Amino acid sequence: MDRPGVRQAEALMKRFGLSPTDLLGMRFAINVALGTAIVWVVLRALQAGNPIWAIASMIAASEPQPQEARRMFTARLVNVAVGSVAGVLFLFAAGPHDWILPLALAATVLVSSYVVRVKTMWRQAPITAAIVIASAVTSQSAAIGVTYGLQRVAEVVFGCLVGLIVSLVMSRVWLIPVR
């Protein structure tokens, strides 16, 4: 069944030499714009500080193709969990000392690479561990660092969730055949 305007849109695209898949970049741009607006407004309303972590994560999780958006979201979430757990464990085991940061990040990479094995977004695990540990080291308090670090992690997860939802909604609103 034809949707209203589909034939006209196809004719216009044909006239300009565009295929439906050429519009993926346009849909991605709209996904990013919508996601940024949502993240910005929600985090500002919650007075959550600087929303840059959430926006960066939303962009990383946004995809014009819904199956890729789901895969990116899952991979990012798994690796954020690995990094969070590693960061907290290292802090409680050794305390907020400068020397634990490189050891914890190396260990997190090994766990992410050889135990968890979710290669997509695998760099997220050591990045997350760095956020948690560096927050504690700079404040010289494991409790303050973990609180601040996990707040950043929550912003990352929120951004990823917004990116996924916007991607899924846009894929239903604006159908683009994928080859």
Image (cartoon, rainbow, N blue to C red):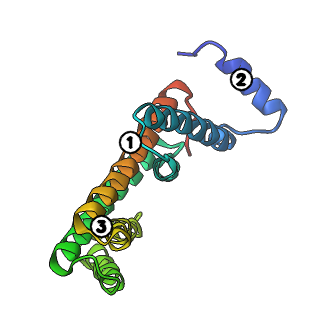
Image mark for residue 6? none
- Packing grade of label 1 (10 A; few <14, some 14-19, many >=20) is many
Residue 70 drawn above or below residue 175: below
Q: Which amino acid does label 3 sit on?
A: Gly
Is the C-beta separation of discs 1 and 3 under 8 Å? no
Extreme right residue here?
A: 15
Which is more foreground, mark 1 or mark 2? Answer: 1
Q: x%, y% of residue 165?
A: 42, 35
Residue 74 in sight here: no
Q: What residue type is labelled 2?
A: Ala
- Packing grade of label 2 (10 A; few <14, some 14-19, many >=20) is few
Is the C-beta separation of discs 1 and 2 under 8 Å? no
Foreground residue among 35 and 50: 50
Residue 95 in sight here: yes
Q: Which residue is drawn at 62% across and 12% down?
A: 4
Q: Which amino acid does label 1 sit on?
A: Leu
Q: Give the Cα distance between marks 1 and 2.
A: 31 Å
Foreground residue among 113 and 9: 113
In the shown orientation, is residue 40 left or right of residue 135? right
Image mark for residue 9? 2
Residue 64 drawn above or below residue 42: below
Which is more foreground, mark 3 or mark 2? Answer: 3
Residue 37 drawn above or below residue 173: below
Q: Give the Cα distance between marks 1 and 3.
A: 18 Å
Q: x%, y% of residue 87?
A: 26, 70
Quadrant in which residue 31 is drawn: top right
Disc 3: which residue: 83
Disc 1: which residue: 161
